[in-house]
Amino acid sequence: DGGITQSPKYLFRKEGQNVTLSCEQNLNHDAMYWYRQDPGQGLRLIYYSQIVNDFQKGDIAEGYSVSREKKESFPLTVTSAQKNPTAFYLCASTSRYPGEQYFGPGTRLTVT
Amino acid sequence: DQQVKQNSPSLSVQEGRISILNCDYTNSMFDYFLWYKKYPAEGPTFLISISSIKDKNEDGRFTVFLNKSAKHLSLHIVPSQPGDSAVYFCAASGGNNFNKFYFGSGTKLNVKP
């Protein structure tokens, strides 16, 4: 059945290491998104992509990078430049406008 | 610059009563609004949406009301059930960047048995 997968569910890294979070969708959606959620806060947009080989910065892009080489995949790299990388990361996609976003189950990243 | 605001971080309601969650926005170009439900450590799930050409949309126990002049929308849940206990986010999109969604900070609903 169709959906969005994020792996792994939990990820632990040492400070100073880059880490890549996976997001795959089989919904044939054009647009994909990465959000970050911190405890007690809402969703903040990191990057989004409306089409393959194109992406735009969201509100908190510093310290993150993305690629969109395939329609199904939108990986997010958390670099060592990100000051506070520990958070819950959510990937989403949407097919059309207007239309709802579908979310993956999320990846909890802990950097120590 | 938060364009979508949910000013009530939490709401407690008795089972069977109505839950009303509120959301305000500042950008008059927004023309599509959504409500999501989220449990801890899970992704949000879509509940209901409304476009700016309507002022009400209903789906079972969930109704969303839109007041464009006040830039305000609300989600009504009737009757509330303990399984509705979760964090609810409102979101908006529209204008030049119609594929970009703006989320509120969420309201944590607790439905007491």
Image (cartoon, rainbow, N blue to C red):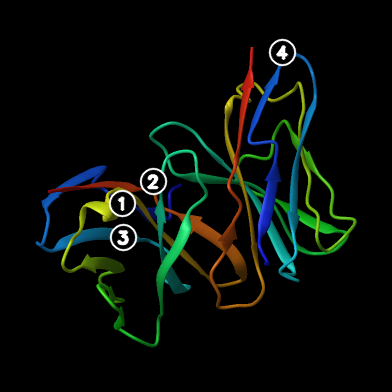
Q: Specify the amino acid type for callout 4.
A: Glu
Mark closest to the chain's N terminus, 2 or 1: 1
Q: Indicate the secondary structure of the residue bearing disc 1.
A: loop
Tell me the residue at 30%/59% (across/down).
B23
Badge 4: chain ID: A
Do discs 3 and 1 belong to a common subunit?
yes
Q: Position of residue B5 (x, y in %)?
A: 35, 52
Q: Report the side of A73 relative to B80 (left or right).
A: right
The residue at which mark 1 appears reads as B6
Badge 1: chain ID: B
B23 and B71: which is toward the camera: B23
The residue at which mark 2 appears reads as B105
State yes or no: discs 2 and 3 in contact (Cβ < 8 Å).
no
Badge nearest the viewer, 2 or 4: 4
The residue at which mark 3 appears reads as B24
* C-alpha gap between disc 4 and disc 3: 38 Å
Q: Quadrant of the C terminus of chain A?
A: top right
Badge nearest the viewer, 4 or 1: 4
The residue at which mark 4 appears reads as A15
* C-alpha gap between disc 2 and disc 3: 11 Å
